[in-house]
Image (tube, rainbow, N blue to C red):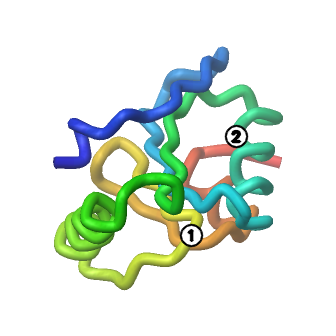
Amino acid sequence: MLEDLEYTVVDGNRKDHVISLYTLSTCGFCKKAMAFLGKEGFAYRYIHVDLIPLERKTAIKKALKDSFKQDVAFPFAVIDDSTHLVGFIEPDWKLSLGIKD
């Protein structure tokens, strides 16, 4: 289901992870997460969940919750189809993406 979505793809030099980002277009933390990925040079894809039809949004949230056994909040990042991050806490993102200070 999640693979059939129309993501916006952002190119980057770092392609060592497959990153899918679920965001809200008006969310400040979502914008910080996207800026962080851009600053670090990661390629990623995203979808603004608030800009799609309600039934599709509901299906996305259910699929994420079923897959990762966690309530969905934004941003919601899926890394390599196995790890997930909820919200934007930079140290957690650095750790999950293998970024060393």
- Which residue is depicted at the point 37% across and 34% down? 6
- Secondary structure category for the residue under label 1: loop
Q: x and y percent of residue 101 in the render?
A: 83, 48
- Which residue is depicted at the point 66% across and 15% down? 13
Amino acid carrying label 1: it is Phe
Counting labels gives 2
Amino acid carrying label 2: it is Leu
- Which residue is depicted at the point 64% across and 66% down? 92
Determine whether 21 is above or below 30 in the image: above
Choose mark 1 or mark 2, whichever is in front: 1
Determine whether 82 is above or below 57 in the image: above
Q: x and y percent of residue 41 in the render?
A: 72, 27
The residue at the far bottom in this view is 71
The first of marks 1 and 2 along the sequence is 2
How far apart, in angstroms, are the residues tagged by discs 1 and 2? 15 Å
Circle 2 Cα neighbour tier, 10 Å, few/some/many (<14 / 14–19 / ≥20): many
Circle 1 Cα neighbour tier, 10 Å, few/some/many (<14 / 14–19 / ≥20): many
Determine whether 13 is above or below 8 in the image: above
Which residue is label 2 attached to? 37
Between 100 and 18, the residue placed more toward the observer is 18
- Which residue is depicted at the point 37% across and 84% down? 71
Between 101 and 11, the residue placed more toward the observer is 11
Q: x and y percent of residue 98 in the render?
A: 60, 45
Q: Is residue 12 left or right of residue 1?
A: right
Which residue is label 1 attached to? 74
- Secondary structure category for the residue under label 2: helix
